[in-house]
Image: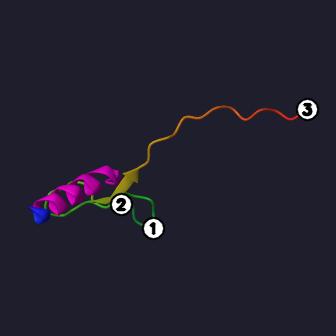
Amino acid sequence: MKKLFVVFLLSLVSTAFAAETKEVCHDKVDKAGKPVVDKKTGKTKQDCKKIKIHKKLEGTEVPVKK
């Protein structure tokens, strides 16, 4: 019973702190600035990275000093 409770708590904690991720891709370019083309498929090669999305917090305005 204790093991089941611990597993349940760990699953809640892991989902609460999991950040949303997004995959961003950019076309590869050579030194001349031309896109690099894959010989087999004929499509441009891409550099893809996974980044974390952070939520922007809303707050109140800072009062202006007189």
Q: Secondary structure at mark 3?
A: loop
Q: Is residue 63 above or below residue 22?
A: above
Report if residue 37 is visible in the image: yes
Label 2, label 3: how many angstroms apart (C-alpha)?
Answer: 53 Å
Upstream in sequence: badge 1 or badge 3: 1
Q: Foreground: 4 or 17? A: 4
User: How many marks can you see?
Assistant: 3
Q: In the rendered structure, which amino acid carries the disc numbered 1?
A: Lys
Report which residue position mark 2 lands on: 28
Residue ID at (86%, 35%) = 65
Q: Residue 42: image x %, image y %?
A: 18, 56
Q: Foreground: 33 or 62? A: 62
- Near mark 2 (Cα within 10 A), the count class, few <14, some 14-19 or many ≥20, is some
Q: Is residue 28 above or below residue 20?
A: below
Q: Residue 54: image x %, image y %?
A: 44, 48
Left or right: 4 as drawn, with respect to 18: left
Which residue, as the protein is rendered here, is positioned at the far front?
A: 1
Label 2, label 1: how many angstroms apart (C-alpha)?
Answer: 10 Å
Report which residue position mark 1 lands on: 31
Report which residue position mark 3 lands on: 66
Q: Secondary structure at mark 1?
A: loop
Residue 5 covered by magenta stretch: yes
